[in-house]
Image: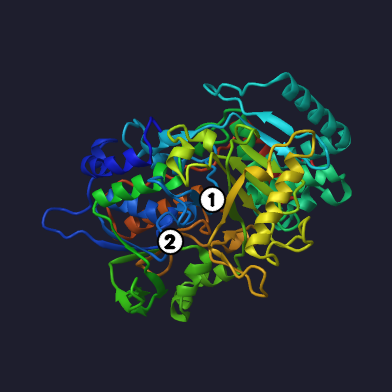
Amino acid sequence: MSGTTRRTFLGTSAAVAGVGGAVLGTPRPAMARSGVAPQTVAVLGGGVAGLTAAHELAERGFRVTVYERKALGGKARSMDVPDSGTGGRGPLPGEHGFRFIPGIYHNLPDTMRRIPFPGNANGVHDNLVAPKEMLFARSGGREDIRIPLLWPGNTPAELTPDEIRRALVSVLDTAFNLPLHEALYFANRFLVFLTSCDERRDQDWERTPWWEFVRAARMSYDYQRILAVGITRNIVATKAEEASTRTVGSVLEAFAFNLLGRGADGPLDRILNAPTNEAWIDPWVTYLKSLGVEFEIGWTVLNLPLDAGRIAGAVVEDAEGARRTVTADHYISAMPVEHARRTWNSAVRAADPQLAECDLLETDWMTGIQFYLTERTPIIHGHLDLIDSPWSLTAIAQAQHWPGHDFPADFGDGTVADCLSVDVSEWDRPGILYGRTAKQCTRAEVAREVWAQLKASLNDSGRTVLKDSALHSWFLDPAVDGLGTPNPVNDEQLLIHPTGTFHHRPKSATKIPNLFLAGDYVAVPIDLATMEGANTSARQAVNALLDRVGSAAERCTVTPLYRAPELEALKRHDRTRHLLRLPNLFDLG
């Protein structure tokens, strides 16, 4: 973070607001002409989609107010652990889940480059750092699979002779447990997808579960856990038995080309070099305020009344609990789908049938828990994927990636040296301690269960990586409530991608002239619930609004996923075969 810490950031926030566009260039030309009042936009939701919409609109001269019911940044924000900071130190850093900004993203990184940050030539984008490696952690005494992430300028992590021995053992162990014919078969299935035309992907593969596409039911345990379950649950955050092959295959394709350095914004794996709010969200809000964006926090949108075919206002409950109606020329609904659709009354749904289609979209639980440790964890310089864990855990030890922070000096009570941030992706499968699902456990039981599953994968092959004596405390996302009761709830769920749901995703432009949609559930080039999808949908919503008002302002760029030009001829050939109802040329069944 160029030596910038939480303390120095707070001291420079006002300076960022003062220089605004001068740091990274001037904002785009304002829409308003002399003597003409700028049009107003109410952005309903302050997550990545809402902040992106506000960003693009404000730079084009619109007067924007963002209404957010909880906290700016949405699921992407970081948060303070209550009452955890003493002696002048800041609270321990918590989060809904750790950030992951891969090189396949293009639109979100473009926005990040345009958010000023003191000392950074490329704004908050310069706060992205690339981990050197990743780990597929096995349980049952099997060696973990350590994979270096090579990229220009990324120095490989140092390996001791023992680590080299373990790496060789892990590769050989997996090679011998994954039959050669299964590995070759998976490679063939991936080739089938790579050479499939868009029509086959949108029709056939959208209706085919990934589990079925890769024939996982008839394969070995390792094939199922690594190539079926591991990929879908830990990367795409959905169940292999239900996930659309179109979604899973598209993301794998993008990652594969990212690894090859093709069509990438940067390294495969990137994270922030400080807590998310410090490195990204707070500077973003500061910049937006410098552009005139106003924020109302703690305001919940309840309804969108329709009058003469247009949204007449947004009925909200303000921070004091009073009900009122806010009005604007235009409205961008930028809430997660499970919250947005509650605000669409029958008249709104009748005015645009695609809104009713959103009732068919599904969400699931993917929630973070942080473990605070009194010593650094010698795990790996990057992400962990615990592919044998019943609750499909992924994790990262964060202190090593935050060079601008002396963790014990900056956070907590002075004894915490690291934060192990864990995402729990499977909440409906029994664990190893209590034999109950995560939803059936209390919060304390969830913490103990996750800790036990971490140790089962990391302490099982001769090293004690995680020590009970080093566990200081833990923090589970407060959006989860009622655990251990018959009615557990998660207020911040994740959109998932079962077969067929791609065709229920709405466009950013609605048939209501002054209503537009933004959020990771909107149809965008990256068919995945991601910050990139949220950012892209907001750009589409702003472009639709500009088209509606006939604005001459520059349109937002929308960069799609990379397409390898050398595969286009095979895709054209497959289009012909698909029209003739023939399988893909490489499809062996």
Task: For residue 25, say whether it is visible.
Answer: yes
Distance from disc 2 to disc 1, alpha carbons, whole Å, reads 14 Å
Answer left or right for 32 relative to 130. Answer: left
**Residue at position x 29%, y 57% from top?**
550
Tell which residue pokes out farthest to the left in this image. 35
Give the colouring mode of the picture. Answer: rainbow
Q: Which residue is mark 1?
A: 530
Q: Return the residue found at the far top.
A: 161
Q: Upstream in the sequence, badge 2 or badge 1?
A: 2
- Asked if the residues shown at circle 2 and circle 1 are in contact, with their CB atoms under 8 angstroms apart, the answer is no
Across and down, in percent, residue 65 comes to: 30, 61
| Structural crowding at the residue carrying mark 2, measured as other residues with C-alpha within 10 Å and reported as few (<14), some (14–19) or many (≥20) | many
Q: Is residue 370 visible?
A: no
Mark 2: which amino acid? Ala
- Quadrant of res 433: bottom right
283 on left or right of 261: left
* Residue beneath disc 2: 334
How many dots with numbers?
A: 2
Viewer-closest of 275 and 522: 275
Residue 445 percent across, percent down from the top left? 68, 60
Residue nearer the viewer, 472 or 390: 472
Find residue 311 and report its image quarter.
bottom left
Name above or below for residue 158 compared with residue 198: above
The N terminus sits in image quarter: top left
Residue drawn 58% across and 59% down?
A: 495
On the image, the x and y values in percent for residue 329 come to 28, 67
Relative horizontal placement of residue 429, taking residue 412 as reference (left or right): right
| Residue drawn at point x = 68 percent, y = 35 percent | 135
As helix, strand or loop, the secondary structure at mark 2 comes to: loop
Q: Measured along the vertical axis of the image, is residue 81 above or below residue 17? A: below
* Residue 556 coordinates in the image, percent (x, y): 37, 47
